[in-house]
Image (cartoon, coloured by chain):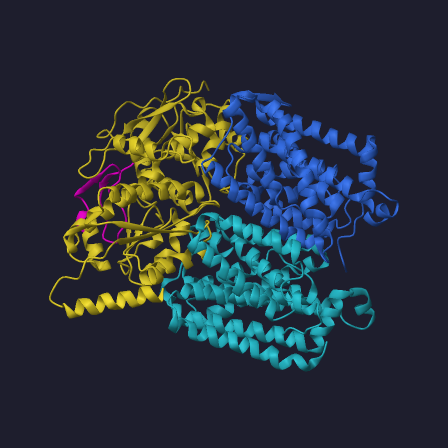
Chain colours: A blue, B cyan, C yellow
């Protein structure tokens, strides 16, 4: 039971790495908190549902379509909102409020368009039945989603460390002011990162019906809180740290479910507070404490 | 800042208190009035910590919920009379605030999120079926024995008066000015002899106390509620949006925020409910983009002192 | 609002002037309710609201409802506000309906949480609350005459059907060990507690696993592994539709087989769960059969087939409103109200209460027998136990299996495990 819970936790946590990855990228580059991240994820799920029911498109190609469309949608959204936001005195804090408003708008429109009934994609599309991994029985869709997540993490790594734009992006992450001083087009770099973030949320959304059973327009808020716990645990502003956060979250959630199931929701919250208080520096040494 | 502002600082709250004191005799949707009073008090309570220290607790509702449950537990287990139970509600919020003092070491968004996580954690504990004998777990609380809507309305109004008084004091006292100095620049404030930790701690506790008392009044007024009601994240979000919309550190800002936004909220909710959430979301987005320092910044930016 | 008040004053003055004559009939009967277009309760609230809307539409198409004190048909006017699953907003809006809109009929929003705030408000204003589906036991007390529960048995009574079934048929089939997994909210939590109580009291079945999980739980794989480790014959999962979908999918993916698997919404919102979990995950599982899936004999209103046809016409499949128990509950509450208005001795709220209580035991609607206990809780609707059978490759159909009086087929338990 213990080994099973740990293996399942790692695989499940890898999916939540994907959920948090884009959120962390945006925070790292722009120092803003996209509270609508979970709602973009939800939209990705509905996009996959719509592509399947209207055109019979399988979720795997649907994920590619969603990635591209969401990335492109992220660019104008960035220019519409973020530069203006960053001119404010306390943009980190105001971003929480602004994207909360956006999240409300997205949820409202989705509800009007698709209604509130649970929607899902048939499990057989990714295979039904258990897959044995290290002696633990896991649902096939979990393994699939975890694999896609691993590919996404690899993609983000390659982008950040093997491309010119990625190098510039990292420069902005380390110090916005210095990057500005060296003549980097901050807005271009940020807009692309924002697009990538939305694309990642979209892909995570495509797999959400398999991981969560079903989706409704209001799943965004809850997912956001979880995603936040994941990226805080894994170091805010360091996208690759999200992997650690996801796995820690997944494993501890499964252990809680096994031994204290009704307290399972207490865990991400306590984890978040504990990590913030005990490891305030994070892996990159970003200052999060004042006194 | 000049000290001359004391008179308008006193006049404005007095007007509000008189208006809301008379309102139940003129308008029969007392619950709507009660909710207005609740949010007016919560907005000023949040103003105490956010306006004067710059800390924005997203989990402000945690204190409100603690207050509601403090009240309920005192009534259920100690058979306390309602006013004594109110004190228990305030005490519960204070205890929670003391436990959460370490969070004040965090900055900015981290503090906001950590306080939210703390509120969620308290909710998870209160609503857990394992604690059914203590809190009634997820099955909800029924306090119909002490149900007294008119009386509890005026108690809530008294709490609002107290919250106003605290903000007036902060705006016009050395302590309050010191707090604002900390907010602007903690390092030089500390070197100028202002106790950063003490100042923040006091503001934090006062802010929690206001929310706890409001939560207790809510429990008394509504008398039947679930943990989901007492720890509804919407309470935090509303209070935050109201303060930001009007503009923190002033009396007027949070007040206008509640009167305008909660007024619009109720008006839209009753006239065009189907687009309600969308309009509200759009309003928030527009606010942050075009008026990030709140409504009062239209005046303060021109050098006009706003009460 | 002032104009309305003045008008009301005029009407009052007029009625005193023409004292001896009956009060003039109002132009419309105002029906007030709330719905949650968003938030956690939207999924149960919106179908119920659609059910109420359909009732109002049908009644008005027939020229209104017959109101006995006025001896004529009067059209209905539905006043509905969106509480967005927010209880503080709901409280304000209930109060608005009572004190500003002066509705004659007040129907609560779906579910116990959004109903809870209405209970003290309705009582304070002496307004009868037609409680749609708030089954919380604390709402009903001897000192509060201003509430009647329309369509579901209160949550403490409801699980008795399943306990009886397990103790009787299940026991004979060799089911000895039971696992209960429930979502820790008022509705399913109370249900689980009462179920365990009934099983323990009978002293036959052994409960080998009894755990709560947070209501927003969506990952059941590890939980199912843990349940399997306790080697139960019967697994009972109690949650909302989202929980049930996630559970059924995880169960199918786990490859674990149990002799008896139960979900609550597999029957109650069968179409929604089918859309999410797929037929193969549901075939063979047990559930309660809601009125939406059982052909009760009616003595008032349409049969369930007729209602289903009307529903599909008003809300074509794919319009985002799934056909299920919540929609039927909204509609059925309308029928009870309609019948009460047709028989009420007067228009005061206590007259309406008398009229509704007079229907108890006499009214059979598409939701089954309507029976109230003295505090206004519903005890008539017996939800029979049912099993879901394959109906082609992509659908399931429910078969009532217990109690014998309502059964339409025999239950089929899974094979005994080899150990």
Vertical comparison of C189 with A134: above or below:
below
Q: Looking at the picture, how far across and down is residue B46, in whole percent?
A: 60, 64
Place residue A145 in its image quadrant: top right
Task: Based on the picture, tell me whether residue C360 belongs to the magenta stretch.
Answer: yes
Residue at (18, 44) in percent of width and height: C361
Place residue A232 in its image quadrant: top right
Quadrant containing the C terminus of chain B in the rendered view: bottom right
Q: Looking at the picture, how far across and down is residue B34, in whole percent?
A: 45, 66
What secondary structure do most residues of the magenta stretch adopt?
Answer: loop
Q: Looking at the picture, how far across and down is residue C363, in whole percent?
A: 19, 42
Apparent side of residue C223 relative to residue B290 in the rendered image (left or right)? left
Q: Which residues are magenta?
A: C358-384
Front-most of C102 and B183? Answer: C102
Q: How many labels sit on residues?
A: 0
Vertical comparison of A166 with C398: above or below:
below
Quadrant containing the N terminus of chain B in the rendered view: bottom right
Task: Based on the picture, tell me whether residue B150 belongs to the magenta stretch.
Answer: no
Residue at (59, 66) in percent of width and height: B254
Asked if residue B296 can be seen in this view, the reply is: yes
Q: Which residue of the protein is positioned furthest toward the right in this rendering? A: A182
Residue at (25, 25) in percent of width and height: C408
């Amino acid at each position: 039971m213990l080994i099973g819970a740990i293996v399942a936790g790692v695989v499940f946590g890898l999916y939540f790495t994907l959920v948090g990855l884009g959120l962390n990228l945006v925070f790292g580059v722009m120092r803003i908190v996209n509270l609508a991240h979970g709602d973009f994820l939800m939209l990705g799920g509905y996009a996959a549902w719509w592509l399947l029911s209207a055109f019979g498109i399988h979720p795997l190609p649907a994920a590619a379509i969603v990635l591209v469309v969401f990335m492109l949608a992220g660019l104008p959204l960035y220019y519409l909102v973020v530069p203006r936001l960053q001119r404010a005195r306390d943009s980190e804090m105001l971003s929480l409020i602004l994207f909360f408003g956006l999240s409300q708008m997205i949820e409202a429109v989705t509800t009007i368009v698709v209604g509130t009934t649970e929607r899902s994609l048939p499990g057989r599309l990714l295979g039904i039945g258990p897959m044995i991994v290290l002696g633990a029985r896991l649902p096939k869709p979990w393994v699939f989603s975890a694999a896609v997540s691993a590919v996404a993490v690899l993609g983000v790594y390659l982008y950040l460390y093997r491309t010119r734009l990625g190098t510039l992006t990292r420069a902005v992450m380390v110090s916005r002011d210095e990057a500005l001083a060296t003549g980097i087009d901050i807005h271009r770099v940020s807009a692309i990162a924002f697009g990538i973030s939305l694309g990642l949320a979209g892909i995570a959304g495509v797999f959400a019906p398999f991981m969560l059973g079903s989706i409704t327009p209001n799943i965004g808020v809850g997912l956001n809180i979880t995603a936040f716990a994941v990226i805080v645990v894994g170091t805010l502003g360091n996208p690759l740290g999200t992997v650690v956060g996801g796995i820690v979250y997944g494993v501890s959630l499964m252990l809680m479910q096994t031994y204290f199931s009704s307290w399972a929701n207490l865990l991400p919250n306590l984890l978040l507070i504990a990590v913030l208080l005990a490891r305030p520096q994070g892996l990159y040494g970003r200052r999060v404490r004042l006194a | 800042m000049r000290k001359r502002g004391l008179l308008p600082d006193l006049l404005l709250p007095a007007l509000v208190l008189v208006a809301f004191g008379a309102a139940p005799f003129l308008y029969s949707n007392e619950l709507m009035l009660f909710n207005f009073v609740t949010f007016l008090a919560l907005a000023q309570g949040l103003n105490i910590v956010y306006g004067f220290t710059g800390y924005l607790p997203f989990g402000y509702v945690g204190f409100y919920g603690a207050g509601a449950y403090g009240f309920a537990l005192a009534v259920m287990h100690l058979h306390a009379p309602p006013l004594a139970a109110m004190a228990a509600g305030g005490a519960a919020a204070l205890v929670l605030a003391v436990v959460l003092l370490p969070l004040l070491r965090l900055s900015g968004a981290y503090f906001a999120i950590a306080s939210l996580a703390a509120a969620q954690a308290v909710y998870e504990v209160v609503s857990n079926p394992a604690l059914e004998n203590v809190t009634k777990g997820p099955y909800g609380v029924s306090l119909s024995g002490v149900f007294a809507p008119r009386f509890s309305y005026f108690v809530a109004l008294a709490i609002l008066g107290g919250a106003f008084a605290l903000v007036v004091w902060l705006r016009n006292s050395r302590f309050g000015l010191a707090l604002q100095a900390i907010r602007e620049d903690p390092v030089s404030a500390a070197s100028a002899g202002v106790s950063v930790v003490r100042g923040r701690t006091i503001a934090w506790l006062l802010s929690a106390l206001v929310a706890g008392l409001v939560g207790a009044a809510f429990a008394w007024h509504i008398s039947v509620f679930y943990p989901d009601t007492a720890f509804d994240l919407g309470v935090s979000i509303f209070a935050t949006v109201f303060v930001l919309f009007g503009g923190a550190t002033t009396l007027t800002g949070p007040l206008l925020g509640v009167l305008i936004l909660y007024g619009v909220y109720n008006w839209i909710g009753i006239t065009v409910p189907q687009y309600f959430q969308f309009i509200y979301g759009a309003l928030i987005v527009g606010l942050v983009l075009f008026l990030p320092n709140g409504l009062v910044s239209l005046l303060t930016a021109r050098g006009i002192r706003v009460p | 609002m002032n104009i309305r008040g003045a008008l009301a004053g005029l009407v009052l003055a007029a009625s005193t002037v023409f004292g001896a004559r009956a009060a003039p009939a109002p132009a419309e009967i105002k029906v007030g309710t709330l719905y949650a277009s968003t938030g956690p309760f939207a999924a149960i609230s919106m179908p119920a609201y659609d059910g109420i809307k359909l009732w109002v539409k049908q009644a008005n198409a027939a020229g209104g409802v017959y109101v006995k004190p006025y001896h004529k048909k009067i059209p209905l006017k539905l006043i509905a506000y969106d509480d967005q699953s927010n209880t503080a907003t709901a409280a304000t809006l209930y109060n608005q309906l009572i004190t500003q809109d002066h509705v004659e009929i007040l129907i609560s929003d779906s579910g116990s949480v959004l109903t809870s705030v209405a209970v003290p408000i309705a009582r304070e204003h002496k307004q009868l609350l037609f409680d749609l589906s708030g089954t919380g036991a604390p709402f009903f007390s001897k000192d509060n005459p201003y509430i009647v529960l329309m369509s579901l048995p209160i949550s403490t009574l409801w699980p008795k059907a399943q306990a009886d079934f397990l103790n009787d048929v299940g026991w004979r089939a060799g089911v000895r060990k039971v696992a209960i997994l429930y979502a820790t909210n008022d509705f399913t939590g109370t249900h689980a507690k009462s179920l365990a109580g009934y099983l323990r009291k009978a002293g036959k079945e052994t409960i080998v696993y009894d755990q709560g999980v947070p209501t927003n739980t969506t990952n059941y794989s590890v939980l199912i592994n843990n349940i399997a480790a306790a080697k139960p014959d019967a697994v009972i999962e109690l949650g909302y539709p989202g929980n049930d979908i996630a559970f059924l999918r995880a169960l199918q993916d786990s490859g674990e087989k149990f002799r008896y698997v139960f979900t609550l919404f597999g029957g109650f919102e069968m179409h929604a769960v089918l859309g999410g979990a797929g037929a193969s995950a549901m075939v063979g599982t047990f559930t309660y059969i809601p009125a939406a899936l059982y052909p009760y004999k009616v003595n008032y209103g349409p049969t369930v087939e007729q209602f289903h046809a009307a529903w599909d016409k008003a809300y074509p499949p794919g319009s985002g409103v799934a056909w299920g128990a919540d929609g039927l509950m909204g509609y059925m509450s309308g029928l009870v109200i309609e019948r009460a208005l047709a028989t009420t001795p007067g228009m005061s709220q206590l007259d309406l209460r008398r009229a509704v209580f007079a229907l108890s035991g006499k009214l059979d609607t598409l939701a089954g027998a309507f029976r109230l206990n003295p505090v206004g809780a519903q005890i008539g609707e017996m939800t029979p136990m049912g099993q879901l059978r394959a109906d082609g490759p992509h659908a399931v159909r429910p078969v009532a299996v217990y109690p014998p009086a309502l059964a339409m087929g025999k239950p089929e338990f899974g094979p005994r495990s080899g150990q």
